[in-house]
Image (cartoon, rainbow, N blue to C red):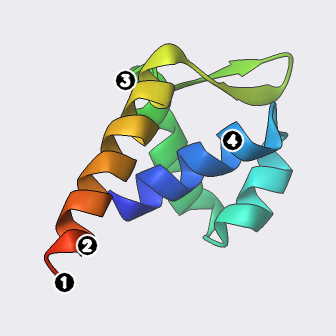
Amino acid sequence: MDIVFDILATVQNDGPILPTRLLYKANMSHSRLKSYLQDLEAKQFLKLSDGKYVLEDEGHKFIANYAQLKKFVDAFGF
C-alpha cells in the first residue's frame, strides 16, 4: 500500500506527469511500475490523458484515507 500511495502522491504533487518521469520518481523497474499503473488505471485511481498520468477522484480519496490511516497507526508507535 505504501508503493501505491507513493505513486499516487507523486502524480498528485507533480500534476499531470509523463510516464518516464513517473518511472524515475517511483524508482522501480519499468515492468513493476507498468503492473502497478495497470492496476491503478483499472481501479480508476489514475488515467492516462494526452500521454500523461492524472489522478482521478478515486485516487484523491485513496490518498486522503491512507494518510488518515497512517496518522492513526503512527499514533500507536507502529
SS under mark 2: helix
Q: Where is residue 60 in the image (x, y as percent from the top left)?
A: 50, 28
Q: Give the residue displayed 19% in from the left and 83% down from the top.
A: 77
- The residues tagged by marks 3 and 2 sit, at their Cα atoms, a distance apart of 27 Å
Q: Give the residue displayed 56% in from the left and 18% down from the top.
A: 56
Amino acid identity at mark 4: Val
- The residues tagged by marks 3 and 4 sit, at their Cα atoms, a distance apart of 16 Å
- The residues tagged by marks 4 and 1 sit, at their Cα atoms, a distance apart of 29 Å
Classify 17 as above or below 77. above
Amino acid identity at mark 3: Lys
SS under mark 1: loop
- The residues tagged by marks 1 and 2 sit, at their Cα atoms, a distance apart of 5 Å
Callout 3 touching callout 4 (CB < 8 Å): no
Callout 4 touching callout 2 (CB < 8 Å): no
Mark number, residue 40: none
Q: Nearer the viewer, mark 3 or mark 2?
A: 2
Q: Name the residue under label 1.
A: 77
Q: Name the residue under label 2.
A: 74
Q: Name the residue under label 4.
A: 11
Callout 1 touching callout 2 (CB < 8 Å): yes
Give the crowd class for mark 1: few <14, some 14-19, many >=20 residues within 10 Å: few
Mark number, residue 43: 3
Q: Which of marks 4 and 2 is in front?
A: 2
Left/right of residue 62 with respect to residue 33 in the rendered view:
left
Amino acid identity at mark 1: Gly
**Residue 18, quarter of the rendered image:** top right
Extreme-bottom residue of the structure = 77
- Residue in front for this viewpoint, 32 or 17: 17
> If the image is split into quadrants, where does the N terminus sit?
bottom left
Extreme-front residue of the structure = 75
